[in-house]
Amino acid sequence: RRVPAAPRAPAGTLAALREEASVCTRCPLHEKATQTVFGEGPEDAHVMFVGEQPGDQEDLAGRPFVGPAGKVFDQVAGEAEIDRQSVYVTNAVKHFKYEPRGKRRIHQRPNMGEVTHCRWWLNLEIELVKPKLIVAMGATALTALTDTKHKLSDIRGQPIRMGKERTLFVTVHPSYLLRIPDERLKAEEMALFRADMVRVRELM
Ligand code: URA
């Protein structure tokens, strides 16, 4: 499937960009999703957090990171003294991808084509917000933000220069922490995520 041509005059403000994204049909994910879940936060935020894609609750609320993964994010960011109101929070993919199972909607990972189509919006968000620091949470965000194929575990927790004025920091996705069944391992991974968020705070 070809990536459609970009509109001739891309939106010049976040509000206009959000409006354009609300009617996005660049990939088929819009057909089943309730709405586009665009990023949110100040237009002049110094830091941008990028997740994977909205989940069930985000799809219904129209806001990123408001479900279980969002609770982990808010809690750990808060402990690291990162104020969610002052940062920009978004996703690599802006529509919820799922398979219905009974009454439940089971999250499906976006594929490379969907990430590539949706990168159009992410790149424009970055262009408008101009964050000094971008935090990729999880492999999908990392894929959307860099062309080179990095393994998340190889570059996690170390600031990486992204051009002259921007730093990329890579950590795990909060949903990953929720999926760890073993309590001891979960606590260890949670501590590592906390340490990453403290490092992010220092880099801000
Ligand atoms: N997971 C994400 O990656 N983003 C959200 O907004 C919610 C869950």
Image: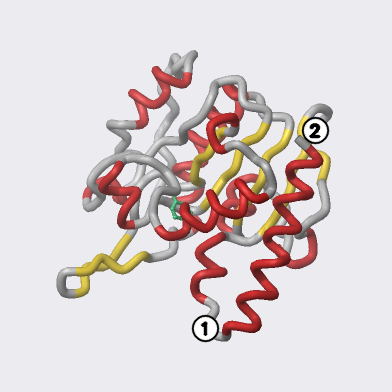
Label 1, residues with CA under 10 Å away: few <14, some 14-19, many ≥20: few
Pointer 1: what residue?
Answer: 181
Kind of residue at disc 2? Gly
Question: How far across and down, in percent of the image, does residue 96 sit?
Answer: 34, 53
Kind of residue at disc 1? Pro
**Nearer to us in this view, 80 or 61:** 80
The first of marks 2 and 1 along the sequence is 2
Pointer 2: what residue?
Answer: 163
Residue at disc 2, secondary structure: loop
* Residue at 29 percent of width and 43 percent of height: 61
Q: Residue furthest left?
A: 102
* Residue at 56 percent of width and 69 percent of height: 177
Q: Quadrant of the C terminus?
A: top right
* Residue at 45 percent of width and 43 percent of height: 117
Q: Which quarter of the figure has residue 38? A: top left
Question: How far across and down, in percent of the image, does residue 1 sit?
Answer: 39, 50
